[in-house]
Image: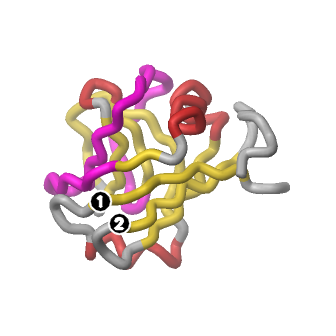
Amino acid sequence: MRAQGFSATAVYNAVFQGLNNDLTLIAKVNASWAPRITEQMWKATPFRVRASTRNDLVLFIVNFNLPLERTITKASRGQLIAIPPLSCLAIALRDTRLRFPAVLLGTVEKEYLDALERIKQGDMFKVVLTRVET
C-alpha cells in the first residue's frame, strides 16, 4: 500500500471511510502546506476517528502529534484543517471564523461535499492517507 515513502511536496488523498455508516469522504491534502502534520498522518495511517459536530465544524480527535505550522483564522466549506491545541482534524461545514489556531491541510473533493451534511455526532471513520500518483 505504501510503496513510496513520505514526500513533503506530494499531494495525498485522505480517505474517510465510514465504519458505522455508508459515508465516504475524500480530501486532497497538499503536504507542502503543512508538511509536519501530513507526515504525522502518513505515519499513523490507517487510523480511526470519531466525529464530533460543533457548530460549523466536524472535529476528529487524533492520537498523534499535530505540530503548529502556518496558521489560518478562517475556514471555507469543505476545507480539511488541523487544530493542534485541540489535537484534532476538522472539516468545515460552512465558511467560518476559527476560535483556535488552525492549519490548512486540504479540501474535500466536490463530489463528496453533500456528504458533509450527513455526518452525525459519534460517527466512526477509518482514515487512510494515500499518495496521489503524478
Above or below 16: residue 86: above
Q: Are marks 1 and 2 in contact (CB under 8 Å)?
A: yes
Instruction: Classify 10 Å Cα crowding around label 2: few (below 14), some (14-19), many (20 and above).
Output: some
> Residue at label 2?
19
For the magenta stretch, what is the residue range? 49-78
x and y, in percent, of residue 14 in the image: 54, 54
Above or below residue 10? Residue 14 is below
117 horizontally vs 131: left or right: left
Say which residue appears at 53% left-offset and 49% top-offset. 106
Is disc 2 placed on a helix, strand or loop?
A: loop
Could you tell me residue 132's position as x and y percent?
74, 55
Instruction: In the rendered structure, find residue 124 and report the number of the disc placed on it.
Output: 1
Residue that appears at 25% across and 55% down: 51
Figure quadrant of the C terminus? bottom right
Task: Indicate left or right for 95 with 105 as reference.
Answer: left
Which residue: 61% across, 56% down? 13
Tell me the distance, in whole angstroms, between the alpha carbons under discs 1 and 2: 5 Å
Q: Nearer the viewer, residue 128 or 58?
A: 128
Vertical position of residue 83 compared to residue 55: above or below? above
What kind of element bears circle 1? strand
Q: Which quadrant of the structure image shows residue 86?
A: top left
Report the front residue among 35 and 50.
Answer: 50
Q: Is residue 94 magenta?
A: no
